Image (cartoon, rainbow, N blue to C red):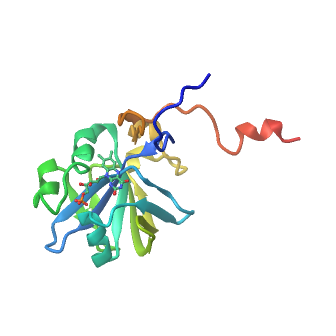
Amino acid sequence: MKKQLKICPAIFPMPVILIATYNEDGTIDVMNAAWGCAYDLHQIQLNISESHRTTKNIRRTGCFTVTVATADHIAEADYVGLVSGDKVKDKFKRTGLKAHKSDLIDAPILDDFPICMECKDIEFQGEYGVLGEIVRLSVDEEFVDDKGNVDLAKMRVISYDPFNHGYYVVGEKVGQAFKDGRKYIK
Ligand SMILES: Cc1cc2nc3c(=O)[nH]c(=O)nc-3n(C[C@H](O)[C@H](O)[C@H](O)COP(=O)(O)O)c2cc1C
C-alpha cells in the first residue's frame, strides 16, 4: 500500500545547480537552483524567479555559467540559495570561493567545482523559464579519462531531495542506459 503525502515535485534526485553571473559593478553573483534540467542536447533550462539578482544579471549580460555542486562545498552551495546578491553586496566574497572570467562569454567560471557549462543566446519562457545555449562544456581533468569518460562517483556531485530538503551524494553506478533494457527487445 502506498501512503498519500502532501504534493511536491517528488522527482528525485533534483540537481543542485549553481548559476554564476556578473553584477553591474563587475562583482560575482551565484545562486542555487534545484528547478533546472537539460532542455535538449545543447540547451539548459533554468526555472528561476524574475525577482532574483541572477535573473536581472542574465537579462543584462545575456550570459551565465552553470555547474553542479559537490559534497566538498555543501555549505557554500546552500548559502548562495539563502541570501540574495541584491541584499548582501559581498555575497560571493563571503563564501571564500574562487572564480575567473570566461574568455568566451560575459560570465564567471567557478574554480572550486569540476564541471562548467558556459551559456549564452538566452531565451526567456513564461514566468520562470530561462533557456541558455551551452557554448562550451569543460570538466576538471582529474575526473576525465583518456577516452573522455567522466567519473561522477569520484566527483561526489550532490542532489536535492524535494521531500525533506536534504542534500545527497550521487555516486554508485548500478546500470548502463540504452543497454540494460535491450534484453527485452526481441
Ligand atoms: C536548495 C535550493 C534550491 C533552490 N532552487 C531554486 C530554483 O530552482 N529557482 C529559484 O528561482 N530559486 C531557487 N532557490 C532560491 C534562490 O537560490 C535564492 O532565492 C537566492 O537567494 C537567489 O539569489 P540572487 O538574488 O543573488 O540571484 C533555491 C534555493 C535553495 C537553497
Depicted 162 relative to depicted 113: above or below: above
In the image, is residue 61 above or below residue 130? below
Residue drawn at (74%, 39%) of the image: 181
**For the view shown, which residue lies furthest in the right direction?**
186
Q: Position of residue 40 (x, y in %)?
A: 56, 63
Would residue 9 be visible to someone looking at this image? yes
What residue is drawn where x is 45% and y is 70%?
Answer: 126
Q: Up-down: is 169 above or below 85?
A: above
Measuring from the top left, give residue 144's x and y in whole percent.
46, 47
Q: Quadrant of the N terminus?
A: top right
Residue at x 34%, y 46% (from the top left corner): 69
Q: Nearer the viewer, residue 79 or 102?
A: 79
| Closer-to-camera residue (185/10) | 10
Q: Position of residue 107 (x, y in %)?
A: 29, 69
| Image quadrant assignment for residue 18 | bottom left
Q: Is residue 59 left or right of residue 150?
A: left
Residue 137 image point, x, y percent: 44, 61
- Relative to 139, 102 lies left or right: left
Q: How many marks?
A: 0
Q: Is residue 28 left or right of residue 157?
A: left
Kindly tell me whether residue 102 is visible in this rendering.
no
Instruction: Assign the C terminus to one quadrant of the image.
Output: top right
What residue is rendered at 26% in x and 41% in y? 73
